Amino acid sequence: MVKLRLKRCGKKQRAVYRIVAIDVRSRREGRDLRKVGFYDPIKNQTYLNVPAILYFLEKGAQPTETVYNILKRAGILKEFQLNQTNFN
């Protein structure tokens, strides 16, 4: 199973996170399948690769709670749900 989760990067006391698609059996800093976004909690900046995120969500990837909140704030989950209702 694949999850969308945060991968820690940056310096001590200055963490930034990559949003990655990763196998659930991998550790936090393990090898990811694909980088799909970036999140800086200090500057409160996000960069999201929307087509890649939608692709993984369509394939059944589960976002973690924090990534879910980031995607919800960006409006990507609404877009995903609209796509799902159009196809069904």
Image (cartoon, rainbow, N blue to C red):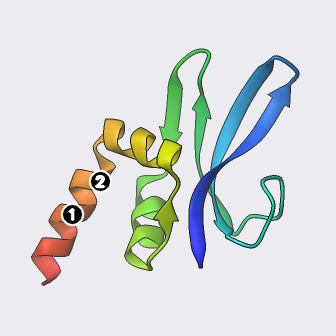
Q: Nearer the viewer, residue 47 or 7?
A: 7
Is residue 75 rendered to the left or right of residue 71?
A: left
Indicate the secondary structure of the residue bearing disc 1: helix
Q: Nearer the viewer, residue 13 or 59?
A: 13
Residue 77 to residue 15: above or below: below
Residue 3 screen position, x and y as percent: 58, 65
Residue 56 screen position, x and y as percent: 48, 70
Number of residue marks: 2
Is residue 14 rendered to the left or right of residue 72?
A: right
Residue 55 to residue 67: above or below: below
- Give the position of the C terminus as an image quadrant: bottom left
Q: Which residue is drawn at 66% across and 64% down?
A: 34
Residue 2 to residue 11: above or below: below
Q: Nearer the viewer, residue 27 or 36?
A: 27
Q: Distance between the residues labelled 1 and 2?
A: 6 Å
Q: Which residue is drawn at 51% across and 37% down?
A: 47
Residue 49 to residue 55: above or below: above
Residue 63 screen position, x and y as percent: 49, 58
Disc 1 + disc 2, Cβ < 8 Å: yes
Residue 84 screen position, x and y as percent: 20, 73
Q: Which residue is drawn at 44% across and 80% down?
A: 59
Q: What amino acid does circle 2 point to?
A: Leu
Q: What residue is disc 1 on?
A: 81
> Which numbered circle lies on residue 22?
none
Q: What residue is disc 2 on?
A: 77
Q: What amino acid does circle 1 point to?
A: Gln
- Give the position of the N terminus as an image quadrant: bottom right
Q: Residue furthest right?
A: 12
Q: Residue at x 69, y 69 (%)?
A: 33
Indicate the secondary structure of the residue bearing disc 2: helix
Crowding near the residue tagged with mark 2, few <14, some 14–19, many ≥20 C-alpha atoms within 10 Å: some
